[in-house]
Amino acid sequence: MKNDKKLLEGIISDYYNSVEDLFFYRIKNDWKIDLSMFLFAISVFFLAINIIPILPGFNDDYFLFLFDFIKKNVNLPFEEFNFWRKWALGVIVSLITFVIFFIIFKYWENRNSKKAIRPRLIKFCYAFTLRKEIKSYLINENETHLENILDYFKKVIYSFTESPFYYRNSDFQKSISFKNLKKVLIKEYEWLEFTNETNEILNSLSSTESKLERRIKLKTELDKTLPLIDLIVLYEFSKIKPNESNCDGIEIKNQRVNYIKEFAKELNNIKEIDDVVEDTNIKRDIIKTITTPIINLFSSSNILTMFFSWLILLTILFVISSILVIKSLKLEIDSTILIGLLTAPFLGAITLVATIYTKNKK
């Protein structure tokens, strides 16, 4: 397996680097591509039910508002709004809609074919990006690398833990884990037996959430997750380049089962996270989520945002402290004191913002 993992820093890394831009383009624009396809399909349907004509035939006031608008602004040789004019307006409007959405659809279809990665490569890219971000964090401890790792993990882990079959009833449809699939099969077919090795693998895979996903979710002990993520990357890459060979000359498509076995073995070697650790991390994450955006306001790259943040903070602090001093010394508020109360936070904010902004520029 060590020889297989050498591929991660060689051909697999090179392959990922060659498609990384296409991958992130897909992530960023996938919803636009899907939306353009959906709108184009709707426009085709809209055009069809106007040409047939279904909508003009069943709606007496169909596009009457548009007919009235045209009549007010254009001298028409006819006044009556009848079926034929409804049908003509419906066809014209639906045809214009079709042309507009067809242009949008073709634009994104062209982008999809030239600038976005093919769908079959997406799981591999998610897996390698997850590995890359965790490794980067372990090197430089920059927590920006951890922002999306849970999402990346969820995109790929189901290849190992979920079957391509589903629970089905009248209320819902849900993917079924391999362990639960085993129970269903044994219940349905009593003659079916699983080997001890298969049972061990299934039991191990069932702990993926409690051992691996929780570590990624809580961003703790991430070094223990890397050997497992390496195996996920190898597994997904073996689908893309099945004939690629490792250092022993073995094609990685023949190693796919070994990747799963090794994944199960590695997973058995790590322990579940204590609830105390989880609770501590959750509380810390909640506090961080609340405080970080507020703290960032005081060093924002937008000078106006930074200025008003400091102005509000200094006004609150200065006014409260001034009121306490005035009350304790029993001073009377005159124009001098009032001007001081108003100008001090303003001058303080300008000074702090100028200092911070100059420092950030450097």
Image (spheres, rainbow, N blue to C red):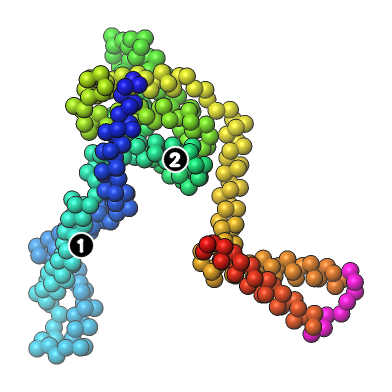
Magenta region's main secondary structure? loop
Label 2 crowd bin: few (<14), some (14–19), many (20+), radius 10 Å: some
Q: Does residue 273 appear left or right of residue 322 in this picture?
A: left
Q: Does residue 35 appear left or right of residue 56 in this picture?
A: right
**Kind of element beneath mark 2:** helix
Residue 338 figure quarter: bottom right
Inspect this view and state whether residue 113 appears.
yes
Q: Nearer the viewer, residue 73 or 32?
A: 32
Name above or below for residue 137 compared with residue 358: above
Q: Percent x, y for residue 357?
A: 56, 66
Residue 108 figure quarter: bottom left
**Kind of element beneath mark 1:** helix
Which residue is the extreme one toward the front?
Answer: 362
Q: Percent x, y for residue 132?
A: 39, 39
Residue at the disc numbered 1: 104
Q: Which residues are magenta?
A: 328-335
Q: Residue at x 35, y 21 (%)?
A: 2
Name above or below for residue 327 compared with residue 294: below
Q: Percent x, y for residue 235?
A: 30, 28
If the image is split into quadrants, where does the N terminus sit? top left
Q: Residue at x 19, y 52 (%)?
A: 114
Q: Viewer-nearest of labels 2 and 1?
A: 2
Q: Name which residue type carries label 2.
A: Ser
Residue at the disc numbered 2: 136
